[in-house]
Image: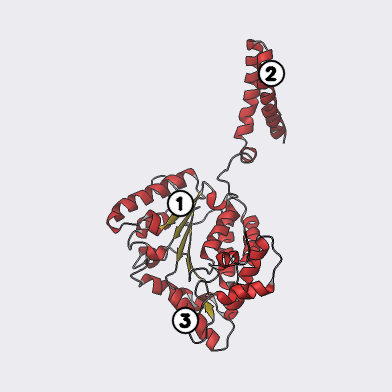
């Protein structure tokens, strides 16, 4: 505490001295500045204080991050009981583990608009205040960053270099790979060494890092299981991870249009959790509309909530249970009803 007070005082004193610089003799000013600067060095080198002014690669406590994560999911993620159960425990447990044997690797699967991007965003925000804008969170979109099949060799080298450099700078780096179903087969295997159980590779440990993959691949299998439960009169909340995880991993592994096609990441069991996002029903779409209205500062109008939900299209053709775009277009549809 003494260091904190002394260093902060030195910082303020240094600023004051500089403002009076023109009124002091050069030698007197130099001595005063030297003393203040010496104390200021302690201020800058004091990690927690320094991190009030600049983003740091600090490990937020698992319990604290987990509580914030759980609260956000409860308020804004609907119809995904498996996601809430699995991801919160996985992330919190990993952050609490001071000596993990490998990086945390999550693969999120489901249709568009079911919450995959939202969950990856909340994970980032629970660890770093800047969230997706943090210097320690890195996003890759397959169609943007790896568009050309003929450049796979170049992409592999660039990807390895990027991950190695960023983990060297911050062990708790987060890497998010979106549109895995559009990634060229074989490319993702280039990062396999970083996800494995090595203590170090060329002097760098990757065990504190987090890798998150997002994909539509496997969504058909997830819908198939959800429909079976619905047609059998069972609640979707009764679906358990064991009902889906193995089927999703096999489906993704054998999907030629998936970046995980015959991937060593799956073959070597380096993905810790395949997290299934269930298709959203009419009632979940209405929940999304209500939350969006509240976030815009509007009083929830149930008539508009119903209209927006009714405008969505649902499948299968006969039952029309699930929204084919999840909640993705809710936000733009609301613009039609409000002059924003």
In this rendering, does residue 75 appear at all? no
Whether residue 177 appears in this view of the structure is: yes
Specify which label sits upstream in the sequence, 1 or 2: 2
Q: Quadrant of the C terminus?
A: bottom right
Question: Marks 2/3: CA distance?
Answer: 74 Å
Mark number displayed over residue 76: none
SS for dot 2: loop
Camera-side residue: 116 or 5?
A: 116
Numbered label attached to residue 20: 2
Disc assigned to residue 206: 1
- Residue 37 left/right relative to 174: right
Q: CA distance from mark 1 to mark 2?
A: 49 Å
Q: Nearer the viewer, mark 3 or mark 1?
A: 3
Q: Earlier in the sequence, mark 3 or mark 1?
A: 1
Q: Quadrant of residue 249?
A: bottom left
- The answer to whether the residue labelled 1 contacts the one labelled 2, judged by CB atoms less than 8 Å apart, is no
Above or below for 226 versus 103: below
Residue picked out by circle 3: 224
Q: Quadrant of the N terminus?
A: top right
């Amino acid at each position: 505490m003494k260091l904190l007070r002394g260093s902060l005082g030195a910082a303020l004193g240094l600023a004051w001295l500089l403002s009076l610089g023109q009124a002091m003799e050069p030698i007197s000013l130099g001595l005063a500045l030297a003393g203040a600067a010496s104390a200021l060095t302690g201020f800058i080198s004091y990690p927690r204080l320094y991190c009030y002014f600049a983003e740091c690669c600090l490990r937020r406590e698992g319990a604290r991050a987990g509580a914030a994560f759980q609260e956000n999911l409860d308020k804004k993620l609907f119809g995904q009981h498996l996601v809430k159960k699995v991801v919160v425990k996985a992330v919190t447990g990993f952050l609490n583990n001071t000596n993990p044997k490998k990086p945390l690797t999550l693969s999120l699967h489901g249709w568009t608009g079911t919450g995959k991007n939202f969950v990856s965003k909340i994970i980032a925000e629970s660890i770093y205040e800047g969230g997706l804008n943090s210097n320690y969170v890195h996003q890759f979109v397959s169609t943007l960053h790896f568009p050309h099949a003929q450049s796979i060799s170049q992409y592999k080298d660039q990807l390895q270099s990027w991950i190695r450099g960023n983990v060297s700078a911050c062990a708790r780096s987060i890497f998010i790979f979106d549109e895995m179903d559009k990634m060229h087969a074989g490319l993702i295997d280039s990062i396999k060494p970083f996800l494995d159980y090595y203590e170090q590779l060329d002097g760098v440990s990757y065990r504190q890092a987090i890798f998150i993959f997002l994909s539509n691949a496997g969504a058909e299998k997830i819908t198939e299981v959800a429909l079976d439960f619905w047609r059998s009169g069972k609640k979707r909340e009764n679906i358990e991870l064991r009902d889906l995880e193995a089927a999703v991993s096999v489906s993704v592994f054998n999907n030629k249009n998936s970046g995980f096609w015959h991937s060593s990441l799956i073959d070597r069991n380096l993905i810790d959790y395949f997290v299934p996002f269930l298709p959203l029903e009419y009632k979940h779409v209405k929940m999304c509309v209500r939350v969006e209205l509240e976030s815009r500062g509007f009083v929830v109008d149930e008539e508009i909530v119903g209209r927006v939900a009714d405008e969505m299209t649902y499948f299968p053709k006969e039952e029309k249970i699930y929204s084919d775009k999840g909640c993705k277009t809710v936000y733009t549809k609301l613009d039609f009803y409000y002059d924003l």
